[in-house]
């Protein structure tokens, strides 16, 4: 084999490995939902299994949103490139939001659509949660390569909606509880830092560039 | 827990009892933590004995009662009551206790007494929810009833459930049970009961007055601002798939007995 062929062979294998990792990520990422479902159907989620299942799915949705938002700062600050996993992380977040809502609608409210609609209209924390779900729909729909090519620069703009959805998710969690608790505040703080990074990023990159240039001199 | 001798009381129900495991592992008792599993998990160090309850205020004969004496001398009955939490879930619990009126009659309330104020113990060293940075409520937990509500035969002080003394997580050694009101009115681990002339402050009302009123009568017509009160999930019965939300009844189904207490009152304004 000539060197160049070996080179493309390695590249192809690396690409296949990468794909395998992405699929593995989907598999691992859905495990918490499967596990909670298994616990729920075998009496392992306590006295109010539906609420517990609903809450766990919501928490995992927030966790995957956070992981999605971490990809870019990790690359900027620590040069860790997880870009190829970002779509999977984002879609996992969307799937969890969808499951969270489905459990609320099907298992919790027993498909009483009037009650669900009244909740969405009347309860601010549910309105915010529903709006955040709605914002994620166009992102999930345009997460394929075809849409990325097709939308070009607009794709990037469109996908900034995740910032709004993330803030909405954090607020939804905070407003859903009866008293102040550490967990929602921790989630909200992490999301706030990750969103603030988007504002600080250009300044950081400029500062680092100037540092590197002065070091090279 | 020790076994209690009690005769069956009135107000029994043929509804299915909530399993003991659920009654003792799914609790709101913020003195032990905000998670519903916290009270069962974190109340081992709590010492419900010895225990004294002070009854004072506008009474002719203020007194302190020892819990052992109360258990030995008060007419204990088993009362099976529905318990409707403000969070839209419910249970059916066999309490052992005596009518609050029996205790109040011993101290002889003065005619100036219009309300009854209750207070929970404060013991940060035994109650982890009373320590640290995030304390959900101000302590002591306080509750209150109008005197006629307190004297109503349905209103009991419970010292046991399922025939044994109260587990710590359910409010040992003595707690209030007012079955036509939301569960948070049922103040736990009571150390003081005072008869007063003005409506006393109540913990959840102090924490968020828009969401929790003084009366807190179960009312499917008046939503909590963040959820509907029209239906409820019966704990331990509906399980995972058979989500049988059931309709919530006015006064939690005790309207025949208690609706007259509120004749002429606007129950939307006085939620």
Image (spheres, rainbow, N blue to C red):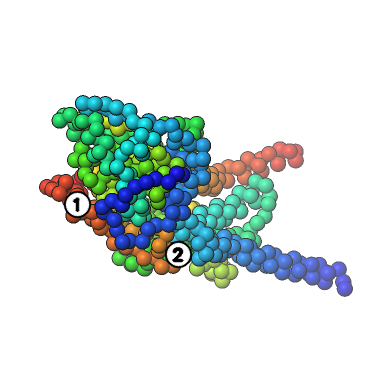
Residue A41 lies, in percent from the top left, at 50, 65
The image shows residue B221, relative to residue A34, as above or below, that is above
The numbered mark at residue B240 is 2
Quadrant containing the C terminus of chain A in the rendered view: top right
- Determine if marks 2 and 1 fall on one subunit: yes
Front residue (pair A64, B205): B205
Ranked by sequence position, the earlier of labels 2 and 1 is: 2
Q: Are marks 2 and 1 in contact (CB under 8 Å)?
A: no
The image shows residue B220, relative to residue B45, as above or below, that is below
Whether residue B52 can be seen here: yes
Residue B236 lies, in percent from the top left, at 42, 59
**Label 1 secondary element:** helix
Q: Residue at image x 62%, y 45%?
A: A205
Front residue (pair B35, B251): B251
Where, by quadrant of the figure, is residue B146 drawn? top left
Quadrant containing the N terminus of chain A in the rendered view: bottom right
Q: Residue at image x 57%, y 62%?
A: A35
Residue A42 lies, in percent from the top left, at 52, 64
Whether residue A157 can be seen here: no
Distance, label 2 to label 1, CA atoms, is 34 Å
Residue A177 lies, in percent from the top left, at 41, 47
The numbered mark at residue A62 is none
Q: Residue at image x 47%, y 35%?
A: B47
- The residue indicated by pointer 1 is B257
Q: Nearer the viewer, mark 2 or mark 1?
A: 1
């Amino acid at each position: 084999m000539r060197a160049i062929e070996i080179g493309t062979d390695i590249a192809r294998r690396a690409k296949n490995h990468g794909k395998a990792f992405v699929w593995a990520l989907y598999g691992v990422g859905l495990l918490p939902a499967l596990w909670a479902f298994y616990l729920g159907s075998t009496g392992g989620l306590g006295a109010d299994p539906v609420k517990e299942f609903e809450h766990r799915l919501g928490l995992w949705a927030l966790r995957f949103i956070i992981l999605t938002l971490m990809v870019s700062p990790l690359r900027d600050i620590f040069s860790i490139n997880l870009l190829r996993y970002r779509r999977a992380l984002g879609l996992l977040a969307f799937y969890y939001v969808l499951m969270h809502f489905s459990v609320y609608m099907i298992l919790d409210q027993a498909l009483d659509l009037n009650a669900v609609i009244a909740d969405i209209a009347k309860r601010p924390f549910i309105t915010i949660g529903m709006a955040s779900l709605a914002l994620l729909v166009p992102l999930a729909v345009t997460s394929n390569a075809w849409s990325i090519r097709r939308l070009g620069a607009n794709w990037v703009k469109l996908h900034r909606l995740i910032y709004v959805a993330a803030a909405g998710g954090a607020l939804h969690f905070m407003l859903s509880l009866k008293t102040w608790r550490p967990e929602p505040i921790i989630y909200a703080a992490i999301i706030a830092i990750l969103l603030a990074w988007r504002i600080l990023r250009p300044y950081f990159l400029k500062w680092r560039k100037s540092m590197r240039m002065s070091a090279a001199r | 827990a020790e076994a209690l001798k009690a005769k069956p009381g009135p107000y029994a129900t043929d509804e299915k009892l909530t399993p003991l495991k659920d009654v003792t592992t799914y609790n709101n008792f913020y003195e032990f933590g905000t998670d519903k599993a916290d009270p069962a998990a974190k109340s081992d160090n709590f010492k419900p004995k010895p225990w004294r309850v002070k009854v004072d205020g506008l009474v002719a004969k203020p007194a302190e009662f020892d819990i052992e004496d109360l258990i030995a001398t008060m007419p204990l009955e088993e009362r099976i009551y529905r318990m409707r939490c403000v969070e839209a879930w419910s249970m059916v619990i066999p309490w052992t206790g005596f009518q609050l009126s029996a205790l109040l009659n011993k101290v002889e309330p003065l005619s100036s007494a219009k309300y009854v104020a209750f207070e929970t113990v404060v013991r940060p060293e035994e109650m982890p929810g009373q320590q640290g940075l995030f304390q959900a409520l101000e302590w002591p937990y306080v509750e209150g009833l109008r005197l006629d509500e307190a004297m109503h035969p349905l209103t009991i002080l419970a010292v046991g459930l399922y025939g044994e003394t109260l587990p710590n997580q359910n409010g040992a050694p003595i707690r209030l049970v007012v079955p036509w009101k939301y569960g948070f009115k049922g103040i736990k681990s009571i150390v003081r009961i005072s008869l007063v002339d003005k409506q006393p402050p109540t913990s959840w009302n102090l924490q968020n007055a828009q969401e929790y009123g003084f009366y807190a009568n179960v009312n499917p017509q008046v939503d909590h601002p963040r959820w509907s009160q029209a239906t409820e999930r019966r704990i331990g019965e509906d399980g995972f798939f058979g989500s049988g939300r059931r309709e919530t009844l006015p006064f939690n189904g005790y309207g025949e007995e208690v609706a007259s207490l509120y004749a002429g009152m606007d129950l939307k304004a006085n939620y």
